[in-house]
């Protein structure tokens, strides 16, 4: 085993998780509408006493169950997403506690939205490509990709559409209005999946080099 590559792989994975959680929190601070992936946890946190992190954990556990149904068997990487869900929820609440932004200007809202989208897309790419324990929504996208035969980035767009529909239904049933959906949601919907696709295409060889491919030699 190449321990240097393994250390690099772990570092990239951890940074990816931290970026992803940061993106989730920044997305809720821009007040322009949350991304479709974050929309369900966000609306749950607004209509209940749950914190955003706890709501993320609940939705992520549902993603894990979805994967179990799709794969029709229990995989170690799927099971490990259970503790991941709780840890990720804690990180989200940690960020949310210390990142306090009130009454942001329109320019600040745009900066927050762009920063959130980039953090989410880059974080997802780093986590998925290091192939440890996937973020449960990403694991759900991987399962969706497996059954639809779509590339991960394209399957992400489909998954986001499903999450958006769920958010609208929950919002309308609970409050009669749509919560957390705005221009930022639209922008995130059309950009996050495509940015992931772009990152994987341009930096795929770099990710593969870190992810010790000595175990899986590339075909000539």
Image (spheres, grey):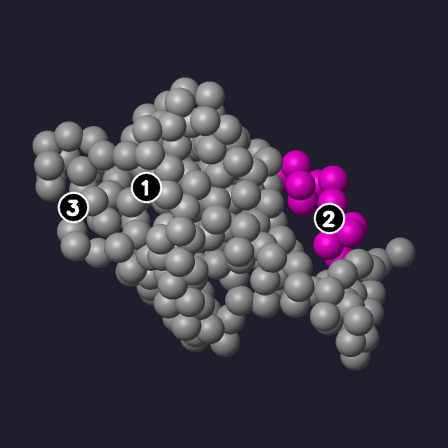
Q: Main structural element of the magenta stretch: helix, strand or loop?
A: helix
* Depicted 105 relative to depicted 20: above or below: above
Observer-side mark, 2 or 1, equals: 1
Depth check, front residue: 68 or 182: 182
Observer-side mark, 2 or 3, equals: 3
Q: Is residue 19 magenta?
A: no
Task: Specify the segment rendered in magenta.
Answer: 197-208
> Image point 74% across, 40% down: which residue?
202
Q: Residues within 10 Å of mark 1 (few under 14, many from 20)?
A: many
> Image point 40% across, 51% down: which residue?
98
**Percent x, y for residue 151?**
58, 44
Q: Residues within 10 Å of mark 3 (few under 14, many from 20)?
A: few
- Answer with mark 1 or mark 3, whichever residue precedes in sequence: 1
Determine which residue is flagged by label 1. Answer: 39
Observer able to see residue 162: no
Depth check, front residue: 127 or 18: 18
* Depicted 86 relative to depicted 17: above or below: below
Q: Is residue 198 magenta?
A: yes
- Answer with mark 2 or mark 3, whichever residue precedes in sequence: 3
Q: Residues within 10 Å of mark 2 (few under 14, many from 20)?
A: some
Determine which residue is flagged by label 2. Answer: 204
Please tell me the numbered disc located at residue 47: 3
Q: CA distance from mark 1 to mark 3?
A: 12 Å
> Image point 23% across, 34% down: which residue?
179
Observer able to see residue 105: yes
């Amino acid at each position: 085993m190449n321990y240097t590559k393994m250390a690099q792989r772990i570092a990239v994975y951890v940074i990816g998780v931290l970026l992803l959680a940061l993106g989730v929190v920044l997305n809720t601070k821009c007040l322009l509408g949350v991304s479709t992936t974050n929309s369900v946890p966000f609306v749950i946190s607004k209509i209940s006493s749950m914190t955003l992190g706890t709501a993320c954990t609940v939705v992520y556990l549902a993603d894990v169950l979805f994967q179990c149904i799709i794969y029709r068997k229990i995989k170690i990487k799927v099971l490990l997403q259970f503790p991941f869900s709780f840890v990720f929820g804690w990180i989200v609440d940690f960020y949310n506690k210390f990142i306090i932004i009130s009454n942001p200007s329109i320019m600040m809202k745009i900066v927050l939205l762009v920063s959130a989208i980039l953090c989410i897309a880059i974080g997802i790419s780093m986590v998925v490509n290091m192939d440890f324990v996937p973020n449960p929504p990403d694991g759900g996208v991987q399962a969706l990709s497996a059954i639809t035969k779509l590339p991960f980035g394209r399957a992400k767009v489909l998954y986001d559409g499903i999450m958006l529909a769920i958010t609208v239904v929950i919002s309308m049933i609970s409050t009669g209005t749509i919560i957390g959906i705005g221009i930022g949601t639209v922008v995130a919907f059309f950009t996050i999946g495509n940015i992931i696709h772009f990152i994987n295409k341009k930096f795929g060889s770099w990710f593969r080099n870190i992810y010790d491919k000595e175990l899986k030699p590339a075909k000539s």
